[in-house]
Amino acid sequence: MKPRDIFTIAVFLTTALGLPILANAAAMISGPVHVIEGDLLKVGTQTVRLYGIDAPEKDQMCTGPKRKHNCGHIAATGLMDLTAGLKKVTCEPLGTSFDGYTIARCRDPHGFDLSQQMIYTGWAFATPAASAGFHELQEKSRRAKRGMWKWQVMRPWRWQSMQ
């Protein structure tokens, strides 16, 4: 079997299974940032889904002891806070998401990982396939009751399946 055939089969299998397709690591994405959702950014002219996280969807509610909160809106605002005043962010493409966006690990100019910051502040979940470090950070955030951990909230991937 030729290397090209192996590559074609690998791309087919990862696409069929919904796994990320590896991107060219040298093709960094950098530019001014605009928040679309709690896990989706426009960096320069490219739309990027943050690696390893899933934030509540735009209309997803969390339930507190006295009222409901729009956690999707709050999560997006949390990401806006993390990127406020930044002239640019730099993202390392890691693959392609199920919905066609580039999955990337994005950092601010100081080197802080935006996905990790969203988990730390309690406004995003670590995805099941995320690194162990993301899950450990999520557990610390949950125990500290940061962000949405103060309330009851359904995992976004479960919420989407019910819509």
Image (spheres, rainbow, N blue to C red):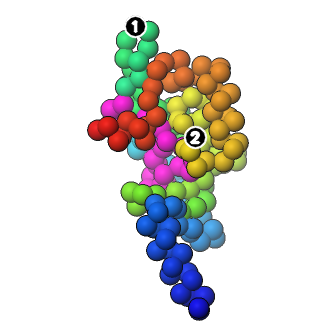
x then y, percent, for residue 134: 65, 41
27 shown above or below 139 = below
Residue 52: % across, % down: 57, 47
Which residue is pictured at 69% across the width and 44% down the height? 132
| Residue closest to the eye, 89 or 18 | 18
User: The residue tagged with tag 2: helix, strand or loop?
Assistant: strand
Residue type (three-letter) at the residue carrying disc 1: Lys
Q: At 35% across and 42% down in the image, what residue appears?
A: 161
> What numbered label is drawn on residue 66?
1
Q: Residue at x 54, y 75 (%)?
A: 10
Q: Is residue 111 left or right of residue 162?
A: right
Residue 152 marker:
none
Asked if residue 64 shows in the view, the reply is yes
Q: Splitting the image into 4 quarters, where does residue 25 fall? A: bottom right
Task: Classify residue 133 as left or right of residue 79.
Answer: right
Q: Give the range drawn in magenta.
A: 39-60
Mark count: 2
**Residue 44 on the magenta segment:** yes
Name of the residue lying farthest toward the bottom = 2
Q: Which quarter of the rendered picture does the C terminus lie within?
A: top left
Q: How crowded is mark 1: few (under 14 residues within 10 Å), some or many (20 or more)?
A: few
Please say whether residue 40 is one of the residues in the magenta stretch. Answer: yes
- The CA distance from mark 1 to mark 2 is 27 Å
| 32 on left or right of 105 | left
Q: What residue type is labelled 2?
A: Ala
Q: Tag on residue 126?
A: 2
Task: Give me the residue at 50% from left, 67% from top.
Answer: 14
Mark closest to the chain's N terminus, 1 or 2? 1
| Label pair 1/2, CB-CB below 8 angstroms | no
Q: Where is residue 152 in the image (x, y as percent from the top left)?
A: 46, 21
Mark 2 is surrounded, within 10 Å at the Cα level, by few (under 14), some (14 to 19) or many (20 or more) other residues, namely many
